[in-house]
Image (cartoon, rainbow, N blue to C red):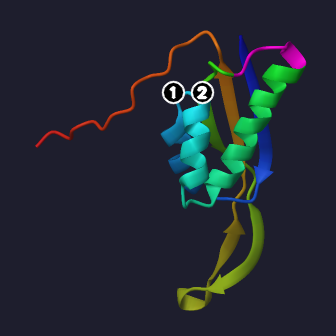
Amino acid sequence: MQVRALARGVRMSPQKARLVVDAIRGRAAVEALAFLDTSPKAASEVVAKILRSALANAANNFSLNTDGMVVVSATADKGPTLPRRFRPRARGQAGVIEKKTTHITVVVSNDIEPTRRGYKRKPA
């Protein structure tokens, strides 16, 4: 059974959050939490909190055993941008400095085996 948890409007760039989310996709939940706890990225704290929430949803709402859970999918989608201030540009123009937000979703399941994480070789 698949169980999900999500956080909407996280004040973080989606590009930076995707680096962390891509690293945990397909891993066992325990292994993903160990990775997130040791990762120096700022997004790892938020993603770890969402993953713990998904495991708690599985245990409390559906009475599932969380030992064999696997991160089936994890996404970091673009949220609304908040225009904050202006930066002067060339020829009297102004550029907007935007604060980006992210919607992060983590789905865990106990029906799927974890995948072996390896590095793909780039063609020469």
x and y percentages locating residue 122 in the rendered image: 20, 41
Task: Locate residue 112 relative to residue 102 in the image: left or right.
Answer: left
- Judging depth in this view, the residue of 11 and 42 nearest the camera is 42
Q: Is residue 118 above or below residue 113?
A: below
Q: Residue furthest left?
A: 124
Secondary structure mostly seen in magenta is: loop
Question: Which quarter of the rendered picture does the N terminus lie within?
Answer: top right
Question: Which residue is labeled 2 in the image?
Answer: 71
Give the Cα separation between the discs numbered 2 and 1. 5 Å
Q: Is residue 2 visible?
A: yes
User: Quadrant location of residue 21?
Assistant: top right
Q: Earlier in the sequence, mark 2 or mark 1?
A: 1
Mark 1 residue type: Gly
Which residue is painted at 62% across and 18% down in the image? 68
Q: Is residue 14 visible?
A: no
Assess whether residue 62 is covered by the magenta stretch: yes
Question: Which residue is labeled 1 in the image?
Answer: 26
Question: Which quarter of the rendered picture does the C terminus lie within?
Answer: top left
x and y percentages locating residue 31 in the rendered image: 55, 35
Which residue is painted at 79% across and 45% down in the image? 8
Task: Locate residue 28 relative to residue 61 in the image: left or right.
Answer: left
x and y percentages locating residue 38 in the rendered image: 55, 54
Is there a contact, CB below 8 Å, between mark 2 and mark 1?
A: yes
- Judging depth in this view, the residue of 52 and 22 nearest the camera is 52
- Judging depth in this view, the residue of 120 and 49 nearest the camera is 49
Mark 2 residue type: Val
Q: SS for tag 2? A: strand
Q: Which residues are magenta?
A: 61-66
Q: SS for tag 1? A: loop
